[in-house]
Amino acid sequence: MSVNSERKWFSESRYGLFIHFGLYSVAGRHEWVQTLEEISVADYQKYLDQFDPDLLDPHEWAQKAKEAGFKYVIITAKHHDGFCLWHTKETEYHIGKTPYQRDLLGELIEAFRQVGIKIGLYYSLLDWHHPDFLVDGYHPMRNNPTYIEQHPGNMENYRQFMANQVRELLTSYGTIDYLWFDFSYKSRDWGTSVGKGAQDWGSVELEKMIHEIQPNILINDRLDLHRGVLTPEQFARSKAMDNEEEVWETVQTLNNSWGYDRDNLNFKTSEMVAKQLVDTVSKGGNFTMNIGPNARGEWDDNSDSILSSVGQWLRKYGKAIYGAGLSSFTPPQDCRYTQKGNKLYLHIFSWPYRTILLPELGGKVKFAKLLNDGSEIRFVDTKHLGGERKATTNLYKEITEVHVKEALDPSMLMLNIPIKEPNELIPVIELTLKEEEK
Ligand code: GLC
């Protein structure tokens, strides 16, 4: 999918927050717990009876998200277990029937909107609670012949149910900026059952209805229609898309689980998260990071501190991320470029000793500065000096002969960086390009 002006906000945002919250948060061992442990709907009921996130403050979540630098949010309205986070009229299986009772989805939408964060809703195409959903190899009851016999599946009914729910979501909460379906698996074949795709979901009709209700909404690519925002999952692309106009976001977790997973402490560091974010933006994509709040409705300490430290980094370096993207210049080793107009941002993943040589930039840079403190970075630009050995005189006499040779290549620009690396998750040098070089 490519950009049009109504949807430009998305690519300019660059950093989004995924929130996975539902009955599985009470189990606290992965959002797929129901099917991983083959739990029946009757046995899963205990999580509904216990669902009471009493410490949850939607405004606090929104404020935290804003301070952490997120520009849009994607909230799980319904996940694969079929539990709905809003007061839907289409099923009794919703938050109004838990001890918590409140319409959390509505309150979250309102709170996030109030702090200027765009609203995305996640809606699961799979539904392990709906009696008409045809049992397949992902279903918790896949090994239960009695259930299968009693539930032969009626996907026509299920399609109608989904269409009604999606209509309800799009007509009850004002503008929804992004709808995030999950997921199609047409090619799966378990022998006794097969996967599901566009025909099973009624994707064409669904998409048409969505656009009739909210024409400017973005939709992701998981309806099996081969269009929409591309969403590579827990995967780092090695290069930009062949079609650079393609809109994409990579969705990532902090510890490999989307839902709260108490005993899984396999957390990324904040440096790794910041590097993933930069790497993604340098390839022209968005980066969406997940949080799985706990059953009391709080963000666990690990997630909280990682996200807030990336947020601190963004406070200084946001200008190199928001509204920025792919650059046509080739970055030096262990670095990434992001670019916005005539500002080229050099993100230094591994701090080298004293100099960095920038290919292709000879004669093209007007000014260079470190972004952490705004201080000037001096550079040698032999193109500017007419390619003469002037660069070696006085000012640059500390440069070794080898460097002089490289620095005298007029296509190169040589930055003189401090020996001591700034104490930042990722140090960034802002290069102001001469106007004609953008
Ligand atoms: C997957 C999983 C799911 C998660 C989603 C987020 O497809 O099924 O649990 O919500 O990815 O991208």
Image (spheres, helix red, strand yellow):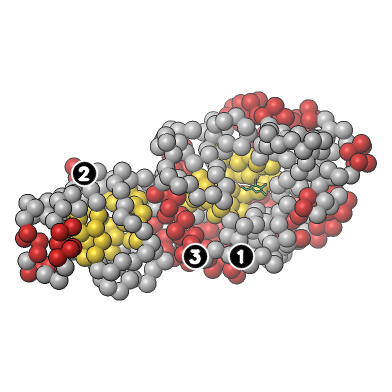
Near mark 2 (Cα within 10 A), the count class, few <14, some 14-19 or many ≥20, is few
Observer able to see residue 209: no
Could you tell me which secondary element the residue under label 1 belongs to? loop
Please indicate whether residue 406 sits to the left or right of residue 201 in the image.
Answer: left
Residue beneath the point at 39% across and 49% down: 282
Q: Which mark is residue 266?
A: 1
Residue denoted by label 2: 437
Amino acid found under the numbered disc labelled 1:
Asn
Please indicate whether residue 244 sits to the left or right of residue 78 in the image.
Answer: left
Return the residue nearer the eye: 181 or 279.
279
- Mark closest to the chain's N terminus, 2 or 3: 3
- Mark closest to the chain's N terminus, 1 or 2: 1
Residue beneath the point at 38% across and 46% down: 325
Return the residue nearer the eye: 31 or 138.
138
Question: Percent x, y for residue 106?
Answer: 65, 48
User: Which circle, 1 or 2, is nearer the viewer?
Assistant: 1
| Image quadrant in which the C terminus is located | top left
Q: Which mark is residue 270?
A: 3
Could you tell me which secondary element the residue under label 2 belongs to? helix
Measured along the vertical axis of the image, is residue 238 above or below residue 62? above
Measured along the vertical axis of the image, is residue 365 above or below residue 267? above
Contact (CB < 8 A) between labels 1 and 2? no
Quarter residue 217 falls in: top right
Question: Percent x, y for residue 427?
Answer: 35, 64
